[in-house]
Amino acid sequence: MSINDLHQIIGDYRPEAPVTPERIQAWLDQFGEDADFVLSETILLMKERYLSKSRALDFLDSTVRWLIQNALIGSNISLLSIQKTGKSQKDLISLFSEVSSMPSFTVNEVRPNFIYLDDCCFTGTTVLRDLRNWLNFSNGSKTNLQILKNGEATLHIVFFFLHYPKLKDRLYYLFKEHECLEAFNRMKIARVHELDKDDRCIPLNLYHEKFDGFKDAIEERHKQNISKYGEQRPELYYIDKHKSHAPFSSVDARSKYDMIMLSKSIEIYNKAKNKLEWLPPLGYTQKTERSFGFGAYAFTWRNVPNNTPLVFWYKGGGHIPLFDKAERGTVDYDDYA
């Protein structure tokens, strides 16, 4: 396997900040004697977890066709654009104009079919907050909640990566709270990948002595956030064994790769000039989670989520990331590089 093999997979990433073969080489050089191993396993990872624009369009096309064929949507569709500034929803909506099977659509208007689209769902915070606000928003003479309750419209949700197995349960309770379970039962959730905790970067030997110093920092962060946010979580977030080594080449290779990504991400974190409470080494996670971070292995042609390990995208502490991450909203990552 070669650098060109990896470049062929991720070469359509952000044309304004492309991943060149030279960029890949510079990233690999930081792993020393593990560089060849990291290259071969990263190729396998990206084959499975990197979503190119063409794959995204194929997914949207097949999803729309499926919804139409099963009479779940008709020709009157309204795409929801309800995320705050800096989120991905507005950009993703423009993709639908390139989907051949997509009927004509409006944005945020009352139609028989609403579609909420986002690239990734990790903690569920964004979609739940968005929909809670949207349900109570007046759309003409009625709220969206009343429109759904009356059966005048159906809501469907579309993600590229759904990394939150409990999302449907949380949505159930949201709609139950609003006495709108019929609308919940009509709703479908479409996704390219549905991933669970086992699909994250969570090294099996999380309690290795090399991490002892950083575990103290986790405990301190956890203690401070509990006082702010509550919701005590009793243990470090880890698993005893992986259900599968996929997409890596073997069980041992997966364990080794996770350890390398965590070790390098901790090194990057320690060298960064500013440490934000919401950004641990393996990426953003719920503030009260006692862990090294979320550790998502999920990447798209548009951007890299900040829930992924820092080693892939963080440019602080002299580190050269594989991907040049786009800034979102008012966040400037140079401020804490």
Image (cartoon, rainbow, N blue to C red):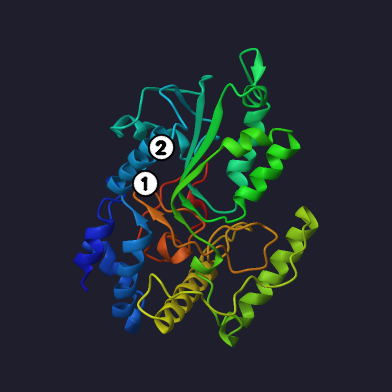
In the rendered image, residue 183, in percent from the top left (x then y), is placed at 62, 33
- Nearest the viewer among 295 and 21 is 295
Mark 2 neighbour density, 10 Å: few (under 14) some (14–19) many (20 or more):
some
Residue type for callout 1:
Arg
- Report the residue that reaches farthest toward the top: 141
Is mark 1 in CB contact (under 8 Å) with mark 2? yes
| Marks 1 and 2, the one that precedes in the sequence | 2
Which is more foreground, mark 1 or mark 2?
A: 2
In the drawing, does residue 170 fall left or right of residue 19? right
Image point (51%, 76%), residue name? 242
In three-dimensional space, the C-alpha distance between marks 1 and 2, rounded to whole angstroms, equals 9 Å
Q: Is residue 29 visible?
A: no
**Residue wearing tag 1:** 302
Q: Quadrant of residue 69?
A: top left
Determine which of the numbered discs, if any, sits on residue 92 in the image: 2
Q: Is residue 163 visible?
A: yes
Q: Quadrant of residue 166?
A: bottom right
In the drawing, does residue 225 fall left or right of residue 42? right
Image point (27%, 52%), residue name? 18
Q: Relative to residue 330, is residue 80 depicted above or below? A: above
